[in-house]
Image (cartoon, rainbow, N blue to C red):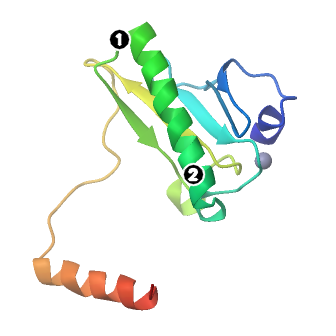
Amino acid sequence: MFCAIAAGRGAAHRLLEDEHTVSFLNIAPATLGHALVVPRRHAEGLWDLGDEELARVARAAGRVARLLRGALDPAGVILVHATGVAAWQSVFHFHLHVVPRYRADELQVMWHAAPVPDADLATLRARVLSANPS
Ligand SMILES: [Zn+2]
């Protein structure tokens, strides 16, 4: 579905387009104005995007957020992305959600945030960095 939209064939309520990205309204919005940004080139998830392509998507998301702010006056905005079924990805063409937030909307945080010991963070940091030498 997003492949066709990204290629310019699929129907969508497009907000912005450029050479590398397409932004359009989500057909099943979480809030008023919930939009999606996709790269034109097919990429399944975050791990399939290069730095420049991701930067282009982020730039488009910023533009969409400003468009929505000007039109809908939300109290805030969140950007959401999911890569992989475990992360609740359901459409396998990379997409970044731009979700305007309103004071009375019904969205809730997706996780329970609880602090962990500093030593655990230090161990985790060492594990991540040692597995990915620069
Ligand atoms: Zn695709």
- Residue 32 visible in image: no
Indicate left or right for 7 with 87 as reference.
Answer: right
Indicate left or right for 57 with 69 as reference.
Answer: right
| Residue annotated with mark 2 | 54
- Quarter of the image that includes the C terminus: bottom left
The answer to whether residue 11 is above or below residue 79 is above
Decide which of tag 1 and tag 2 comes sooner along the chain: 2
Q: Position of residue 111 (x, y in %)?
A: 31, 52
Determine the residue positioned at 31% across, 43% down: 109
Determine the residue positioned at 43% across, 39% down: 79
Q: Secondary structure at mark 1?
A: loop
Q: Position of residue 20 (x, y in %)?
A: 71, 40
| Ligand 1 lies under 8 Å from the Cβ of mark 2 | no
| Residue annotated with mark 1 | 73
Q: Position of residue 63 (x, y in %)?
A: 50, 27
What's the distance in space between the residues labelled 1 and 2, CA to CA?
27 Å
The answer to whether residue 128 is above or below residue 106 is below
Indicate left or right for 126 with 47 as reference.
Answer: left
Determine the residue positioned at 80% across, 22% down: 11
Of circles 1 and 2, the one toward us is: 2
- Residue 105 visible in image: yes
Indicate left or right for 127 with 120 as reference.
Answer: right
Please state which of residues 52 and 73 is positioned toward the viewer in this rendering.
52
Q: Secondary structure at mark 2?
A: helix
Q: Amino acid at mark 1?
A: Asp
